[in-house]
Amino acid sequence: MGAITMSSEAGQDARWYVGRTPQQWRAFASSYIGWMLDIMDLMLFAMMIKYISADLSFDKGMAGVIASMTLLATAVGGLVFGFLADRIGRTRSMVLSILCYSLGTALCGFSQTVTQLLIFRFILGLGVGGEWSAGAALITESWPAQHRGKVMAWVQSAFALGYALAALVAAIVLPLFGWRWVFAVGLLPALFAFWVRRHTEESEIWVQQKQRLSAGQTLKVLFGDHLRPVLVCLAFTSAAMCGYWGLFTWVPTYLATPVAQGGPGFDLLKSTTWIVVMQAGAALGFIVFGYVADAIGRRRAFMLFFIASAVAVPLYVAIKSPTVLLLFGPLVAFFGTGFYSGFAPTFAELFPTQIRATAQGFIYNTGRATSALAPALVGFVSQGNGVASALGATAGFFALAAVLVFLFLPETKSEVLQ
């Protein structure tokens, strides 16, 4: 694709964490914690759909629209903050994005109408999309090519921790103070932004990049010289994310659905326990994917996880035993979430430094925005066919992603950035 050359780092220590500099570890910490907190803020709504909808008087269909609106906002945020990351620096853009999603989350707690909630969730989505753009560029540029997949996998595993943290925050705060105070907790990441600004340095490759493109120049390079990789990556990312967001936005609601309506009928404590256990599987999936991708290549790793997800999801919603659900849930999350670790390294290896953050942010978050159709679709379909049937249908998205990767995605394993 013209943006990469073969790595010359093969002689380095095979252990990704050996011999790293303080700057690399600070970049790691900033990206990991920022990602964990942004997912926590993003997923708080999914944990409280039942309670917010009762208070503000909206149905499952509208709940899906709200979730989808948030994902649409991440596409805008990914493009805007991605451009800022290419223009003013990765860490500065990260700080601004963290402040944005923290403010949006806190404002959700003041919502008196569905319209207000939609607006505040849009603000949150802008910051969430931007934080990934800046963090992904910072990490992929700061660590050696031969370990890029593994390092980003560890960072991406913060997704699972953030999801589990959202469930725990809701379980603790909701019964004591109500859903509005749950959103107040989402303001805490703003404090972390000041640590990032003070302690995290820009990547060397960005500092050495002398030419800073204007918005027009960036778009011309992205959609001119690199149009094909943009379209390929956007296609399989969108399909995979439709599978993920269609499934995991509604898993908490599915677990709380009464047995008479086709669900397990769990109470808040049991649902939280099952969600946390599932995220343990997701965290392992994130990490394992990175090692697999660095060993056998990005394409094979993606296809393995997508195909396994397509098989596991229908089996999961067919399970009636709470014990089997507890045991099988982590496996679903392992494959149905772990593939996220491959996005940042793959995109980084396909695009040059001048537009890397913009490309990563645009593709990842436009894919996430496209997948906004999935939560809304599951919400509307579940009203007539039940949540279980609607969730099972998301397997088709994972199967489509596997086909797209097999047909169109080039292999970029172990290649250094330009």
Image (spheres, rainbow, N blue to C red):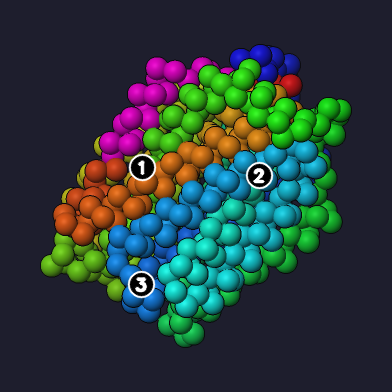
Residue under pointer 1: 243
Q: Secondary structure at mark 1?
A: helix
The mark found on residue 216 in the picture is none
**In the image, residue 141 lies at what x, y percent?**
72, 33
- Nearest to the observer: residue 14 or residue 267: 267
Name the residue at 36% across, 42% down.
243
**In the image, residue 396 lies at what x, y percent?**
28, 36
* Amino acid of disc 2: Val
| Residues shaded magenta | 395-413
Q: Secondary structure at mark 3?
A: helix
**Is there any visible trace of residue 42 in the rendered image?**
yes
Residue under pointer 2: 80
Mark 1 to mark 2: distance in Å?
Answer: 26 Å
Q: Secondary structure at mark 2?
A: helix
- Nearest to the observer: residue 292 or residue 196: 196
* Amino acid of disc 3: Ser
* Amino acid of disc 1: Gly
Residue 199 vs 27, above or below: the answer is below
**Is there any visible trace of residue 160 in the rendered image?**
no
Q: Are marks 3 and 2 in contact (CB under 8 Å)?
A: no
Name the chief secondary structure element in magenta: helix
Residue 230 vs 137, above or below: the answer is above
The mark found on residue 53 in the picture is 3
Residue 63: name its quadrant: bottom left
